[in-house]
Amino acid sequence: MLTASVTVDPAFTVGPVRPRTFGSFVEHLGRCVYTGIHEPGHPTADADGFRGDVLELTRELGVTTVRYPGGNFVSGYRWEDGIGPVADRPRRLELAWHSTEPNLVGVDEFVRWCRAAGVEPMMAVNLGTRGVQEALDLLEYCNGTGDTALANLRRANGSEEPHDIRMWCLGNEMDGPWQIGHKTAAEYGRLAAETARAMRMIDPDLVLVACGSSGSGMPTFGEWERVVLTESYDHVDMVSAHAYYYEEDGDLASFLASAVDMDHFIESVVATSDAVRAAGKHRKRIAISFDEWNVWYQKRAESHVPEGDDWPVAPVLLEDRYNVADAVVVGGLLISLLRHSDRVHAASLAQLVNVIAPIMTEPGGRSWRQTIFHPFALTARHAAGDVLRLAVDTPTHETAKFGEVAALDAVATHDPATGDVVVFAVNRSVADELELAVDVRGLGDLRIVEAVTLSNPDHTWQATADDADSVVPVPNAGATADGARVKAVLPAVSWTMLRLATS
Ligand code: AHR
């Protein structure tokens, strides 16, 4: 058995646990909207046609923000198509996913769905085929409070109160050659700056996110951020990061260490943005909105978009089925996001329903939790207070993708109001159990409130509509607390949460 230890000291804080870290994403893609969150004929549907079962699972997941309406979709989207009487809305060719968009759901319905789900909407504007004026129009339509044409149009469409959307993404993945209206960093940086500057004339307090890179493997990674932020630094609050390189392609050890890539991604963007800060003699710091991240099996048939004359409405697309190892990786990626809470101020698990998602639905039928649902829900529910910098002593092993990596990955939170500590830990070993000792010096004697572990002898087990519950986080029976020392055995390929409270 491997052994590792972490030392938890409440003096060493990284930053606060930021609620917006636990965001998600709803795109008009595949069955995320139609038969995902929205299905008027479903037995649980509300007056707006939103599925009650999905709303309930969204609340249980603990999602805080939901980004909308894309994704690649937004770069060809006319937001005006999605307002007003549903019967009058146009059906459009949707180029990003080679589908037909019926526009049954638009911004007003989405905001109503957010209110029902108890989440904050995060809106993206189209900077692919459109520009400053359309972004301003959408902002005025959503948030306008006065007697102006677009605010009145919203009222006429049934939303008397302003939507008051605070977070806005200035386009989506504009560095990607696949993006409709793809731009160079200089072109996009100028457009982002001018769009942001004009949006702030309506409301200076918006939280504005410039597009960073679609992945740390992009050929322009680093230089993209440098140029975009040089153009837009004074006008934006955050730069985005997207990461989907995580999939098990026969190399489980590397896959389990995916958080190494996320750590590197975040630290590189921080370094670049701080270099721009220094060069431009700026005072503020730019934060990161990691607004698309997940495991994604991009080579599988589920991710192949329709072709030719086939332009379906809500096709089955990107419907990855996740296994236990995928869930362990998702838990590890959350550890990475929390560990950087000084600079990662928002994040969105992509996506929420059906499309690379923690929640799955059958049209007209059941909904269920995928394996990745569990580490997300537990982390969102229990991470509280400050994120702590841990001293970690762990064995290491070699991986093909990342070289030598730690077997144990962990982060802890400490709530100064209650004294409660929560440790989140992953055992990345493919074969060995790991005995973890947590030294909680500085916190007095702690007792275990809850110790749960997600693992399975067969890490390829997947949840289905028929059986979503036979592998879920279960009590870690051997976990013990003895004075200032807590111990637990973490199985190979596992994710664990230890909730500790003062005795
Ligand atoms: O989440 C799926 C797609 O991945 C999004 O539309 C796009 O932004 C990213 O490339």
Image (cartoon, helix red, strand yellow):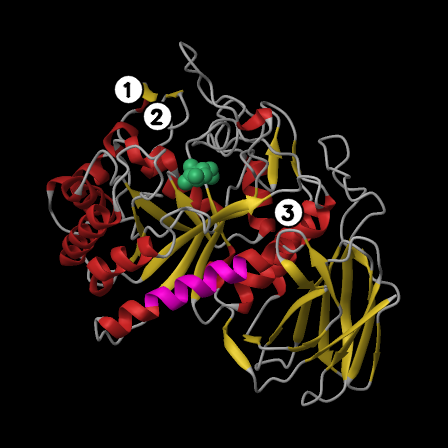
Alpha-carbon distance for marks 2 and 1? Answer: 7 Å
Queried whether the magenta region covers residue 95, the answer comes back as no
Q: Earlier in the sequence, mark 2 or mark 1?
A: 1
Percent coordinates x, y for residue 31 in the rendering: 51, 28
- When the figure is inspected, residue 95 is found, relative to residue 247, above or below; the finding is above
Task: Please state which amino acid type lies under the numbered disc 2.
Answer: Asn
On the image, the x and y values in percent for residue 59 come to 56, 49
Image: 70 above or below 224:
above
| Quarter that holds the N terminus | bottom right
Q: Quadrant of residue 421?
A: bottom right
Instruction: Tell me the SS state at disc 2.
Output: loop
Q: Quadrant of ligand 1?
A: top left
Residue, far left: 148
**Residue that badge 3 annotates:** 373
**Would you identify the image quadrant in which residue 388 lies?**
bottom right
Q: How many marks?
A: 3
Stretch in magenta:
262-273
Q: Of the two numbered discs 2 and 3 on the same chain, state the one appearing first in sequence.
A: 2
What label sits on residue 103 in the rendered view? 2
Q: Label 3 near label 1: C-beta < 8 Å?
A: no
Disc 1 is placed on an element classified as: loop
Secondary structure of the residue carrying tag 3 is: helix
Q: Is residue 234 left or right of residue 450?
A: left
Residue 492 visible in this rendered orientation of the protein: yes
Query: Which residue appears at 77% of the width and 39% of the height?
Result: 461
Q: Residues at badges 2 and 1 in contact (C-beta under 8 Å)?
A: yes
